[in-house]
Image (spheres, helix red, strand yellow):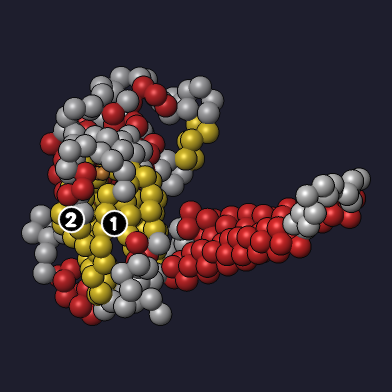
Amino acid sequence: MWSGTPLFPLGASTIAERVDALYFFLIAVTVFFSLLIAGLIVYYAVKYRRRAPDAVGERIHGSMLLEIGWTVVPFLITMVIFVWGASVYFAMASPPAETLNIYVVGKQWMWKFQHLDGQREINELHIPVGRNVKLIATSEDVIHDFFVPAFRMKADVLPGRYVNIWFHATKPGRYHLFCAEYCGTRHSGMIGEVIVMEANEYQEWLSGGGPEGSLASAGEKLFADLACNTCHRPDSAGRGPVLSGLFGQTITTQAGERVVVDEAYIRESILNPSAKITVGYQPIMPTFQGLVTEEGLLELIEYVKSLKTTPQIDTK
Ligand code: CUA
């Protein structure tokens, strides 16, 4: 309804309606009480104005009913805002089980995207309409913030961590992408576009790119180039843990801690291998800090994810 007005961004995701409804509710509450208070100030100023030069105000001894009223009513209103806001927040914060995953790396001053099929983009993100998309985002340097107003979606992208951002685009089109965290001289230039396409157009677009092959196959190559495969062998004869079927599992560390093998754990194990050693293994792996780029880490992660459980070969 506001599409002609640049004051309010177009809504193009499932969460947009819910955010807008809450937003308009907050505005309505604010307008109602502002008018009520301003109106009463004027009304009482007129009603109780001094009529004679020596008039003295009546003594008031308070009103329990009024005290309870203006405590309970605002409490209930703020609880409505809290519960409503929390439910929208949880919907935004928990991605559904089935998602199309895309990796995002922010750096001064650009957004880099990597699709699982191998396509890479800078400051442009192509996605299909009507599907749950999950961005797994990190930063190469400082804190950036991924912001698509039309999706009502905004999240800090932090160095050394993976942030999950998800949305479900409802309308094909091109939407602004901003960096919403001041990140240096050219912060204002760290912008781009999210291009939402019909499913068939998206398939066409996907098949048009990716000369380097899928992310996982690039990771497999890197895995061999870095000689990871000398210790992480597919059978249990290697000096490092077998990686097949490892993703999503829970392992026990030497410290007795239970850790889920997710993107962040694999990343940490590459950059700071001795942080969480699997029980039964020696802390012999060297760090790969400085040897693998952020993109390289994502390729390795995708490679580990792609390793499905293979039947264990008994060598004895
Ligand atoms: Cu990146 Cu501001």
Q: Nearer the viewer, mark 2 or mark 1?
A: 2
Q: Regarding mark 1 in the picture, which secondary structure is present there?
A: strand
Residue 154 visible, this angle: yes
Residue at the image point whose x is 12% and y is 60% from the top: 210
Q: Which residue is mark 1?
A: 102
Q: Earlier in the sequence, mark 2 or mark 1?
A: 1
The quadrant the C terminus occupies is: top left
Q: Position of residue 189 (x, y in %)?
A: 17, 49
29 left or right of 217 in image: right
Residue at the image point whose x is 25% and y is 62% from the top: 176
Q: Amino acid at mark 1?
A: Ile
Q: Regarding mark 2 in the picture, which secondary structure is present there?
A: loop
The quadrant the N terminus occupies is: bottom left
197 left or right of 100 in image: left
Q: Position of residue 138 (x, y in %)?
A: 30, 43
Q: Residue furthest front?
A: 53
Which of 190/105 is in front? 190
Q: Amino acid at mark 2?
A: Asn
Q: Residue furthest left?
A: 211
Residue at the image point whose x is 21% and y is 44% from the top: 187
On whether ligand 1 comes within 8 Å of the CB at mark 1, the answer is no
Residue 256 in which image quadrant: top right
Please count the marks in the image.
Answer: 2
Q: Which residue is mark 2?
A: 123
Which of 256/194 is in front? 194
Q: Position of residue 56 (x, y in %)?
A: 84, 47
Q: Position of residue 272 (x, y in %)?
A: 32, 25
